[in-house]
Amino acid sequence: MVGLAGLSADSVRVAARSPGSDRSTPGGRRRRLREAALSAGMLAPAVVVYTVMTIVPVIVALYLSLTDWNGFSSAAFVGLDNYARLFDDPDTTRAAVVTVIVAFFGSVGMLGLGLVYALQLKERNWANSFFRTLAYYPHVISSLILGFLWSAILGTNGAINNTLADLGVGPVGFLFDENLAVITLVGVIVWAGFGFNVVLFVAGLQTVPRELVEAAQIDGASRRQINRRIVIPMIAPVVTVAMVLNLVGLIKVYDIVVSLTDGGPAGATETIAYVILTRSFAGTDVGFATAQAVGLMMASAALSVVVTALRNRQDRAAAS
Amino acid sequence: MTPNPRAGARRPSPVRVALLTLLFAVMTVPVYLLLVNSFKSQQDIQNSPFSLPFARISLDHLAAAVQSPQYNVLKSYGFTLVLVVAVDVLCILFAGPAAYVIARSLKRRTQFLLLFFLAGTFIPASALIVPLIYVLRAIGLGNTVTGLILHDVAMTLPVSIFLFVGFIRTVPRDIDHAAAIDGAGRLRTYWQVIFPLTRPAVITVLILNSIGIWNDFISPQILLSPGSGTYTVTTAIYAGISQYSTDMTKVFPNLLLAVAPVIIFFVYMQRHIISGLTVGALKG
C-alpha cells in the first residue's frame, strides 16, 4: 500500500495542472484533494486484487521454497536445500530436458511452418483468408480438448492405428513409444500453434513496400531471391518476437500434456509445469513444488525480459 | 506479386497446390473425425474410423452425452459463461479506471505502477497456483467460486491495463480538459468520455479474456475441488474423459459438445478474434 500513498501525492500534482482547479483558493485545494482521493480510488481495486492474487503468492512461494512442508504440519526452514534438490532430482531434470526440447523444437516448427504458409497466404483474397483461418482455428480451442482429440486419433485404438491395422501395418506407438511420444507431443503443439505465427507473419509481410519488390522484379530477381534477400530480412523483427513468444508460451506447457499423454509413457513427456502440479504438489511436497515453481517463474521472466529488450530495440529501429 | 497484372489469372504453382492441399488435410481431418465419430457406435468407430455409415448413424450417443448426469459438458456451459462474464465485467471495471489514471499521470511513481502490473505477464499460472491456494485459504476464499473469479481477474489485469494505457494515450488530453471544464470529475470523464472512445481496445480485451477464461483448465481444476460439484467445460471434460477414456462413444460426443460453442463463436467473430489476439500478443 506504499504505492497508493505515493500515488495520491502524485495525483494532487496532476489535478493541480488540470483546468478548473486553482491553487490559491481554498475551494481549489479541497477540489485537488478530492481529485487525488478519486485517482487513488480508481487505482485501488486493480492494485489490491492484483497484489493479493499475484504478488503475495509469489512472495509466499519464495518463502515456502525455503522450507520443508507437507502442507499440513508446521513448515521447517531448510534454506536452499530444495533448490539443490532441483538438480539432483531425476524427475525434475528429465522434465527440464523435455520442456527445453518441447520449447525449442515446438518454436522452430511453428516458425518454419508459419513462414512457409505466410509467404503462400500473404496476398489478400478470399482463398488465402480461408486458409489462414483454417490454419488458425486450433488457437481458440482449449489445449486440453485438442490433446484429448489427438489422443483419440493417435492412440493404440485410435483412428490412425485402426486404419494402419487394416493395411497390415502397425500399431505405431505415437503415444506409447517413449521417444515417439515426445515427437508426437511436439507435433500436436506445432499443429495447434503454427497458424498463430502465420497470422503474425502475414501482418508483417503486408507492411513490406510493394515498390521494393517490383523494383527487384524489374531487375530480374526470381521470386525466391526476392523472398530471401528482401522480404524475410524485412520481417526479421516480427520473426524474432514470434520466436520468443513461442518459447515463453511453451516452457509452461501443461494442459496438452495432461490430455495427450498424461506425462507417459513412463514419464517420458512430463514437463516442468506437469511435474509441479501433478507430482510434487499433489505428493504434498509443497516446499519442493514451490522451488520448482520459482525456477519456472525465473525462466519465464528471463525469456520475457529478452522479449521486451528485443521489442524495444525494434521500436527504436522503427522510430529512427 | 506478378510482374504483369494481366497474368493475374495465372495457374497456381504445383508447390502452392501441394502445400495448401496438405494444410487442408491436416487441419480438417481431426475435425472431420470428431464430427463423424460422434454419431457412430463403438464398433464402427474402431472398424472404420474415417467412414460415415449413413444407415447406422445415430444421435443416441450425443443425446446420452447431453443427458449424462455426471460431469455434464452441456450443463457446464452455464457456469463457464457466468465465470467468463463475471471476469470480463470486473476486469473492465478495475482495469479501465486504473489504466486511465496511469495513462494521464506524468509522475514516475505512477509509471512504475505500469511496470508493476506488467511483471504479472512474467508469471506462469502453473507456477503461481500452488502458493495461491494457501493465500486463498488464509483469506477465507479457499475452494470458492469468488476465489477463482478474483484469481482470473488478477490474471487478466496485466495485459488489459497495458492495452488500455497504450490506447488511452492516443486519446488527446484536450478531451479530458473539455470534460473538466464542463464540470465532470475524473471518474465521470473516464466512463462517459474516454471509455466509449476506447471501444476497439475494450473489444480486444473482452475477446482475449473470454477465450482465455473459457479455455482455462489449471485454475478451475486446482482452485475448485472436484468435491464442489462445480465444473467448467474443461474440468467437466477432464473428469468425464479420465473416467471413460476407452469408451469412444462417450469421448467423441463430449469433445464435440466442448468444441461446438467455441467454433461457432470463432466462425461468427473470426475477423475480430484474429486481429484481437494478434494485437494482444504483439503488445502484451
Image (spheres, rainbow, N blue to C red):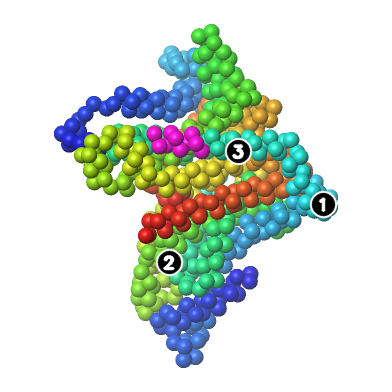
Q: Secondary structure at mark 2?
A: helix
For the residue marked with disc 1, what is the amino acid? Val
Q: Which residues are magenta?
A: A107-116
The residue shown at (24%, 46%) is: A211
Frontmost of labels 1 and 3 is 3
In the picture, the quarter occupied by the N terminus of chain B is top left
Quarter-of-image position of residue A22 = bottom left
Say if mark 3 contacts mark 2, CB within 8 Å. no
Question: What chain does mark 2 sit on?
Answer: B
Q: Is residue A108 magenta?
A: yes
Q: Is residue B255 magenta?
A: no
B12 left or right of A249 in image: left
Question: What chain does mark 3 sit on?
Answer: A
In the image, farthest residue toward the top: A168
Q: Which mark is residue A133?
A: none
The residue singled out by tag 2 in the image is: B191
- Residue A107 seen in the current view: yes
Q: Residues within 10 Å of mark 1 (few under 14, many from 20)?
A: some
For the residue marked with disc 3, what is the amino acid? Val
Say if mark 1 contacts mark 2, CB within 8 Å. no
The residue shown at (62%, 56%) is: A54
A156 left or right of A72 in image: left
Q: Residues within 10 Å of mark 2 (few under 14, many from 20)?
A: some
Count of numbered circles on the image? 3
For the residue marked with disc 2, what is the amino acid? Trp
Q: Which mark is residue A100?
A: 3
Where residue B226 appears, as percent x and y from the top left, is 67, 40
Q: Secondary structure at mark 1?
A: loop
Q: Secondary structure at mark 3?
A: helix
The answer for how far apart the CA atoms under marks 1 and 2 are is: 51 Å
Q: Which mark is residue A78?
A: 1
Where residue A204 appears, as percent x and y from the top left, is 36, 46
